Image (spheres, helix red, strand yellow):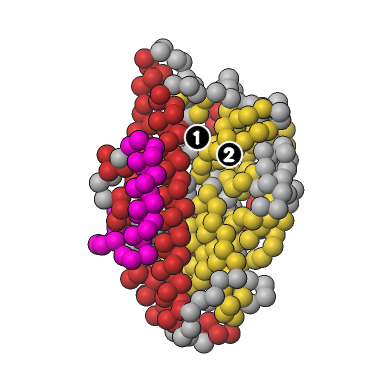
Amino acid sequence: MQNLSNRLMSWASIIDEKTVEQARTSARMPFIYPHLALMPDAHLGKGATVGSVIPTLGAIMPAAVGVDIGCGMIAVRTQFTKSQLVARELAELREQIERAIPLSAGHANRKIVATAEPRVAELEELATKNGFDPASYAGHWRNQLGSLGSGNHFIEISVDETDAVWMFLHSGSRGVGNKIATHHIGVAQRLAKQWWIDLPDSDLAYLVEGTEEFWAYIRHLRWAQHFALLNREEMMDRVARQLSETMGEDVVEHERINCHHNFTEREKHFGKEVWVSRKGAIQADRGRPGLIPGSMGTASYVVAGLGNPVSLNSSPHGAGREYSRSAARRTFTHEQLREAMAGIEFRDTDAFIDEIPQAYKPIDRVMADASDLVEIRHTLRQVVNVKGD
C-alpha cells in the first residue's frame, strides 16, 4: 500500500499517471472522509477512477458509482467434476446458454419467463415503495431482467483447484440502470451550475444529503442495485438449467455468492457514518465472501475479505484495463486472441479482440497487490466462455 497523500491511499503496483491524477482530483473534494482508496485494478474512468473506494460525508457523486449501477458477480459451486464436464459436448452447452440468455447491448427477452415473473413482481413492489416508475427510465425494463449485455460482462463454466465445476457470471442493471445513473449525474451537474459551484471535473458533480434530489437518487440507486442482483440470479437459474441438461442431472448448489462492485452503501469508518461508493471494488469485511474475475482466458478467484480498515473494507473487482478498447483493437490480433483462449470453448470472433487478456493487468499481480485485502479460497479456470458482442 502506498500513501500518495493524506487523502489518497493506493494498492496498485501497476498504474499510470493519468489515473493517479484523476484520483487525486477526486480525493480533493471537500467531503471525502477519511481518504480515497485505490484498488490494485485501478484505471482511468469517467469522472471517478474505476477501482476506487470513495467515502463521503453529506454528499454523493453519482458518477463515482458509475453508469452500470449494481454491476457485479455471481458464482455457484456445483456437484459436478471436471472429468464429467469435459466428457460432454461443450460447444453445444455454450450455444444453449447463448440461446437461453439475451447477449449484447440493447438485447432483451421477448417475453417474461416463469422464473423471472416473481423477480419482476418484487421489483415492481420495490419501485412502488420507493415512489417511482422505472418505466420512466426504460419502458422495457421487465424484459431486460435476465440479459447479459456486452463489454466485459460474461458467463463462464469453470473448474477450481479441486476440479469442482462452477457457474460464474458478470453483469449489472442493464439499460434501466444506465438511464437512472445518467439522469442523476445530469441532475447533479445542473445543480452545480445553478449554484455556481466550481468543479474540477463536471463528472464530479454531487448531490447534497438532505435534499430531495439526493434522496431521489438513493431510492432509484437502491432499486437499480437490487435489479442488478436479481438480474444475475435470473441468469444463473438459466445457466443451471442448460448445465443440468448437458450433464443429464439437476445442478445441486453447494455454494452461491452474489456481490456488487458498482454501488453505494451507508457504513461506519474511522468513527463516522459515511456513504461509501465503490466504483469497481467489492466489499471485503472480514470473512465476507467475494468474487474477483480475471480477464477473458485467465483465472478468477473466490475470496474472503480480511477487513482491512485503511481500504475501507474493500478489495479489487477484477484485473483492470491497461489498454483502452480502441488501443487494444489497434494493438492485438484475432490470432493472439485465439492463442490466449486455447483450450477454452468460446465464440471465435474478432468482436472480442478488445477483451483479450493482454488488454488487462495480469490478474496474478492484482491478487498479489491485494494480499492484505482478501484471502483466496478458490482459483477458477474457464472451460466455457460466453460473451456478448
Whether the magenta-drawn stretch holds residue 206 is answered as: no
Q: Residues within 10 Å of mark 2 (few under 14, many from 20)?
A: many
Measured from the top left, where is residue 214 in percent x and y?
Answer: 44, 27
| Rendered view: 187 above or below 156 | above
| Amino acid type for the residue under numbered disc 1 | Ala
Kindly identify the residue that appears in the image at 34 percent across and 60 percent down: 117
Measured from the top left, where is residue 373 in percent x and y?
Answer: 71, 48
Quadrant of the snapshot with the C terminus: bottom left
Marks 1/2 in contact by CB < 8 Å: the verdict is yes
Q: Using residue 137 as the reference point, say whether residue 207 is left or right of it.
A: right
Q: Does residue 224 appear anywhere in the picture?
A: yes
Name the one closer to the observer, 53 or 251: 251
Quadrant assignment, res 375? bottom right
Name the one closer to the observer, 5 or 207: 207
| Rendered view: 213 above or below 254 | above
Please name the residue that numbered disc 2 is placed on: 52
Please report whichever mark, 1 or 2, sits nearer to the chain's N-terminal start. Answer: 2
Measured from the top left, where is residue 102 in percent x and y?
Answer: 33, 62
Q: CA distance from mark 1 to mark 2?
A: 9 Å
Instruction: Provide the secondary structure element on which disc 2 rests.
Output: strand
In magenta, the rendered stretch is 105-132
Kindly identify the residue that appears in the image at 44 percent across and 70 percent down: 239
Q: Does residue 341 appear anywhere in the picture?
A: no
Using the image, tell me which numbered label, if any, was put on residue 64: 1
Q: Residues within 10 Å of mark 1 (few under 14, many from 20)?
A: many
| Rendered view: 92 above or below 51 | below
Whether the magenta-drawn stretch holds residue 129 is answered as: yes
| Amino acid type for the residue under numbered disc 2 | Ser
Quadrant assignment, res 82? bottom right
Kindly identify the residue that appears in the image at 53 percent across and 38 percent down: 264
